[in-house]
Amino acid sequence: MTTKSRRNEAFVAAVLVAPFVLIFGWMFIYPTLQMIYLSFTKSPLIGAGTWVGLDNYIKMFNDKTFWTAIWNTSYFVLLTVVPGTAAAMIIALMVSRLNGWIQSFILAAFFLPYILPVTVVYIIWDWMLNLQFGIAQFIIEPLAGKRVNVWRSLPWFMPMAALLTIWWTNGFSILLFLAGLRNIPKELYEAAALDGATRWQVFSKITWPLIWPVTVLCLTIQLILQLKIFDQVYLFAQGGRTQATMVLVQFIYEQAFQKNSGGYAATIAVALFVIVVGFSLLQFQLLRTRGGNK
Amino acid sequence: MTDAISGAQPRTAGRRPRYFDPGNWILNLLTAAFAAIWFFPVYWALATSFKTDDEAVRKGINMLPESLHLDGYAFVIQNSDLPIWYVNSIITSVAVTAIAVFMAACAGYAISQLRFPGRKLLWYTVLASFMVPVSALIVNHFIIIADVKLLNTHAGMILPMLISPVTVIVYKNFFDSMPREYREAALIDGANEFQLLFQMFIPMNWGVTTALAIITFIGAWNSFLWPFLVAQDEKMMTVTVGITAVQDAFGVAYARTLSGAVLASLPVALAYLIFQRRVTQAITLSAGIKG
């Protein structure tokens, strides 16, 4: 290739990547660097600050609310990731047995919540769980012995937030499991049927080992997603004891937009950043070793 | 299995046989029951939205609305800013979808097909950015958008929502798998890179493009945190953010609140129901599974 056409190719490439690089740099790289810088300053949300070194970090590690947020976020992750993935697997197994339009119909029923806006999910469940008129109270009352104001009762708050998050976001994992199940060669099942294998044997000897990679994928995607929990918890905690149910992103929001301390908010954001990137690297490593073994 | 063989055998061959299998039917019933329970909250929202406010809070469980009252809908449309929020949502979601998909297609094409300095660096940055939690950047997005005086504007709402490294990754992978000969033949025929991209690579990957566009649209319509931060004036809110304001304003008028919620989800629900296969494809692709 001649140098001229090389240079021409580079020019065309520059034109093509320019919009993306511009936006990416402006809305992604720059804010990331600025966030790190900001975390070393004491500054309001808008306006100049002063360099304070590691003060914000020291403050954060001694901040009780920070640890509450870490604990609540972890608790929420614990309540959603494994139960959600297990539920998604069961649903996918159920749906994959069906065929044709019945399958699409049943799948749509399970998937539809996933595409709803979070505020709609909030409104639906707020109504369902309404203390006086909520239809879910007909289930809660016999279980708890009384009606429960779920979003104002600490022991109920996170489990219920987790339950409706699973209800809301599970469509994603269900689709991944279905794709995984579809990739299992039919011949394996046919051979097992000829050998007279029971349903449990088929599941434990064929299905489970072969969808394990998808399971790991779902678990890690869910883990990283749920660490960033904000919307649901924020909406349901409105007007209640927000400090007690605080999660990490909410803590960032509170410090930045309600307490006007941009520097400290950035510090918490760095903490979230480190946690999420850490888990992502772990996921990457996991997926790579798996790929290497193949 | 070839056509000849599958034609000669009954469809159930290989599966379990023709005799009545109660286990199968029990599992089918369980599946249907579970699906009904799972879908129930959506049904209940729809049913409530067609009731009157009095009817919604009547004693006992009334599974069906007495009749299809549209009072709630009429009230929300006439007495809240919902129509304006709808316009805001459409403007931002359509703009985000068009711009993000276009940028990603161009960048994905360049990374996949062209040689230029910094290509590797750009690709690895895109891959790495996949890990970064955008919610950690809200504070700085707010500062940046405030700096350029775009708070409370559509542009300010759109800008941070344009970053979608996944879209670039998906495009790059799809363009990589295009046969090399197509490109070479077209170049010999005198086509330039732009013609190649817009008249060959994108049309030949139209399925992926629609899948990505639909999922981007749904994501933009549904996004909450950023529009919630940037829209300071009620008139600038998107539907997704606005409907909670409806709830606050109406108090315990649940039929009205749920009518608002149904209206807010209508575009994305329709997009999903019409393009079910594309949505499925986009989701499996974005998780790195070839669909």
Image: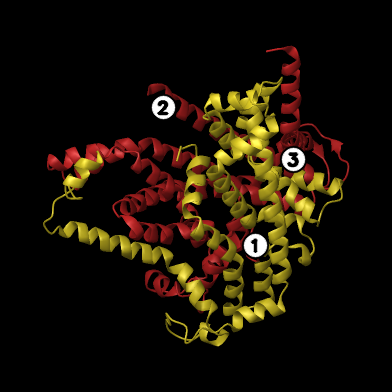
Chain colours: A red, B yellow
Q: Name the residue beneath numbered marker 2.
A: A290
First in sequence, mark 2 or 3: give its number: 3
Instruction: Using the image, determine if residue A113 lies above or below residue A266.
Output: below
Give me the disc on residue A239. none
Dot 1 falls on which chain? B
Please report, as a chain letter, where disc 2 is located.
Answer: A
Judged left or right of residue A272, residue A53 is right
Between marks 1 and 2, how big is the CA–CA gap? 40 Å
Do residues under tags 1 and 2 come within 8 Å of each other at their CB atoms?
no
Q: Amino acid at mark 1?
A: Thr
Q: With B273 as the anchor, is A98 left or right in this view?
A: left
Give neighbour class at mark 2: few <14, some 14-19, many 20+ (Cα, 10 Å): few
Q: Amino acid at mark 2?
A: Arg
For label 3, count other residues whose C-alpha is less than 10 Å away and answer few (under 14), some (14-19) or many (20+): many
* The C terminus of chain B - image quarter: top left
Label 2–label 3 contact, CB within 8 A: no
Image quarter for residue A120?
A: bottom right
Viewer-nearest residue: A101 or B289: A101
Q: Which mark is residue A27?
A: 3
Task: Give the chain of mark 3.
Answer: A
Q: Quadrant of residue A48?
A: top right
Marks 3,1: beta carbons within 8 A = no
Element at label 1: helix
* Residue occupying the far front of the picture: B189
Residue found 13% across the figure and 41% down from its top: A194
Residue A264: % across, % down: 75, 43
Q: Can residue B124 be seen from the camera position used here?
A: no
Name the residue furthest right.
Answer: A48
Q: How many marks?
A: 3
- Name the residue at the top extreme: A2
Could you tell me how far apart the alpha carbons at marks 2 and 3 are, in whole angstroms? 34 Å
**Disc number placed over residue B240 in the picture, else none:** 1
